[in-house]
Image (cartoon, rainbow, N blue to C red):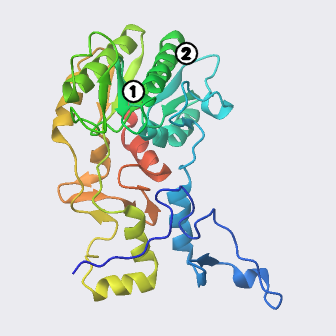
Amino acid sequence: MAATFATPRFYTDRTSIVAGTRPAVASAPPHRSQSETRGTNKIAGSSLRLSDDVRRIDADATADKDYPCLVNAGAVAPSSLPLCNQAKAAGSNIAIFGDSHAGALGRAGAAKASERGLGAVILAKQNCRPLVGVSLYRSKEPDLTGKCSAFLDAATKRLTDDPSLQRVIVGGLWAIPLMEAGPTRYIGTINATKKLSGRPLQEAGLTALTRQLSQAGKKTILVQDVPFLSVDPVRATLIEAIPARKFIAELVGGNLEKPGFDSEAHQDADLKAMFDKLARTPNTSTIEAGAFFCSRDGCRFEENGQLLFYDRTHITGHGAKRVFDHAQREIWK
């Protein structure tokens, strides 16, 4: 019988995993010093002493969930915040363009660019894949199609009009949605794409984007999907970090042979073939992001106490740094 564990409320409301709010030190009773209460938080109305490991997991899981450069689904243009527009007037800069998967690369990418004396611009919007002539349709959010199209038009214009943006890192959740019909799917927005659907439509949108950027003299780096995990990485990591949870998991037969490792994570081989084809476009290359987390035996979501994923499809800042560290040649050459 599989074990189930109650997970603190964090997955859907973007709050702290330790208390349902941002981490806070509990108020000390009059007879105890503040230092004596350090490490105590309220979970489900009870005082529990939390280890540094749990606090670190909490920080990793929530650090980038409210990244201001990732504009929400209602936005029709990229963020104008200075944090998201750090292009330097002289010299070359990088741009990170796409949906929340591009947003997950934002902080690490900007930091890596700064180390090389470059500026960075982040053009990222929730639920909006970076494509040309293609948008997203959601039955529960019918105005998303137009808003996503407006955002993509504004972002691609910024990319092609600004000569200082010489490298464009493109990221997205490419594996979803590929269904021809369904509550969420790609939809063609120009004559050349309106009769297409599913993967042919996705490929047409990416092909048009890479050609447009190439013609504008940009170097485009397409980041392929990270793996889709079969487990909640935060819950699984907490099992290891909280002794009582780990004991229960072992007692009922939980598989803890490889902590931080998912042997059933999924990667789409067909998508890799499409990206290899797109890489033939002049000034275009691809990064197989999954290779930096996965081997034949599965995929790693935590390593050396650092959480690499904060949910089943999004990497943390540590995960993003891993991508940039392993793909230095493809990005900076």
Q: Nearer the viewer, mark 2 or mark 1?
A: 1
The location of residue 92, given as percent across then percent down, is 54, 19
Position of the C terminus by quadrant: top left
The location of residue 170, given as percent across then percent down, is 40, 29
Which corner quadrant of the image does residue 222 belong to?
Answer: top left
Residue 332 can be seen in this image: no
Q: Earlier in the sequence, mark 2 or mark 1?
A: 1
**Nearer to us in this view, 235 or 180:** 180
How crowded is the residue under tag 2: few (<14 C-alpha within 10 Å), some, or many (20+)?
Answer: many
How crowded is the residue under tag 1: few (<14 C-alpha within 10 Å), some, or many (20+)?
Answer: many
Is residue 273 rendered to the left or right of residue 29? left
Q: Element under label 1?
A: loop
Q: How many marks?
A: 2
Q: Are marks 2 and 1 in contact (CB under 8 Å)?
A: no
**Nearer to us in this view, 201 or 103:** 201
Say if 141 sits above or below 203 in the image.
below
Which corner quadrant of the image does residue 174 belong to?
Answer: top left
Q: Which residue is mark 1?
A: 130
Q: Element under label 2?
A: loop
Position of the N terminus by quadrant: bottom left
- Residue at 70% in and 73% down: 25
- Residue at 69% in and 78% down: 38
Is residue 11 rendered to the left or right of residue 263? right
- Residue at 64% in and 66% down: 23
**Nearer to us in this view, 87 or 4:** 4
The location of residue 208, given as percent across then percent down, is 31, 15
Is residue 140 rendered to the left or right of residue 280? right
Mark 1: amino acid: Pro
Mark 2: amino acid: Ser
Residue closest to the far bottom: 31
Q: Which residue is mark 2?
A: 164
The answer for how far apart the CA atoms under marks 2 and 1 are is 20 Å
